[in-house]
Amino acid sequence: MKLSDSKTKLLTSPGERQTEVLGGYLTKRLPTTLALLAVVACGTGVAKAAPLVNGLLDSVSVSSQVLATPTNWVVDAFKTVGGPFNDGASSEGFANFQAPGGMGLFFKPFQGSTDNPITVNFFQDTAGTPGFQYTLTAFAGAEANYSGLIPLSPTRSLLALDFLNASNAVIGQSVLDLAGAGLGTPNGNPFGYAQYTVMGTAPAGTATVRARASMVDAFNNVAGGGQAFVVDAFTLNSVPEPTTFMFVGLGLIGLIGTRRLSQPV
């Protein structure tokens, strides 16, 4: 059917100029809509990023342990026999790696024994967003006689991201075995300090992200010598998971298609 002159004029008037996009004609209002959607999406990603407090571990105070530990962080220490223990870790200047004059955290494996090992979990919780990808980095080091470096030792040294739901139940994890990643390898730094990274995507139902370093089932090495396990300088970053952008893109394509079909013919 031939369009009337008035309808043709309506479609080509300056107020409804069209631009060729994906083979169709879209009103000039659509680019503005797309721009607004992009701003909202990017703004949401920035707002959901939750940096750690006192990531350098330099601010210290006494909490669960007999000596000071990093403020805004939790130190949960316990022994297989006897349960909670209050001298499993402490903030020490010799454990510092970044920020001269600062502090790092010193784990104390020698407080355990082969028949009564010690476990220390060091962590900070922050609000999490399902579908976001989180990246945790930290520096870690160890002395040569640390029980976590003994071949076939049950001691585990971990850098981890835990994803918790609203009931504080763990619903997902990403865990890096530091010994397997080269912990304590001589590199010219004190304790063989090196930076390690663990990444994970928050599953559906995530309410909290936990940044954690753990020394599990550690014990005193009867051979003596340096046995320290140390950590410092944590960072936590988050971005929308790549598939999130894909779904946004598909949604915009659908919007374009809907607009195209709605044009008078």
Image (cartoon, grey):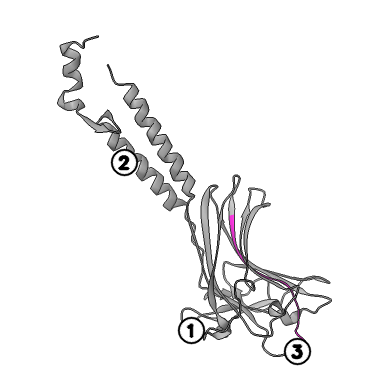
Magenta stretch? 209-223
Are there few (<14), some (14-19), or many (20+) residues within 10 Å of tag 3?
few
At x 53%, y 81%, the residue is 96
* Disc marking residue 101: 1
At x 42%, y 35%, the residue is 251
Taking 53 as reference, is 206 left or right? right
Q: Is 218 placed above or below 134 here?
A: below
Q: CA distance from mark 2 to mark 3?
A: 65 Å
* Disc marking residue 199: none
Q: CA distance from mark 2 to mark 1?
A: 47 Å
* Disc marking residue 223: 3
Q: Secondary structure at mark 3?
A: loop
Whether residue 28 is visible here, answered yes or no, is no
Q: Which residue is mark 2?
A: 35
Residue 240 painted magenta: no
50 and 3: which is toward the camera: 3
Q: CA distance from mark 3 to mark 1?
A: 32 Å
- Quadrant assignment, res 193: bottom right
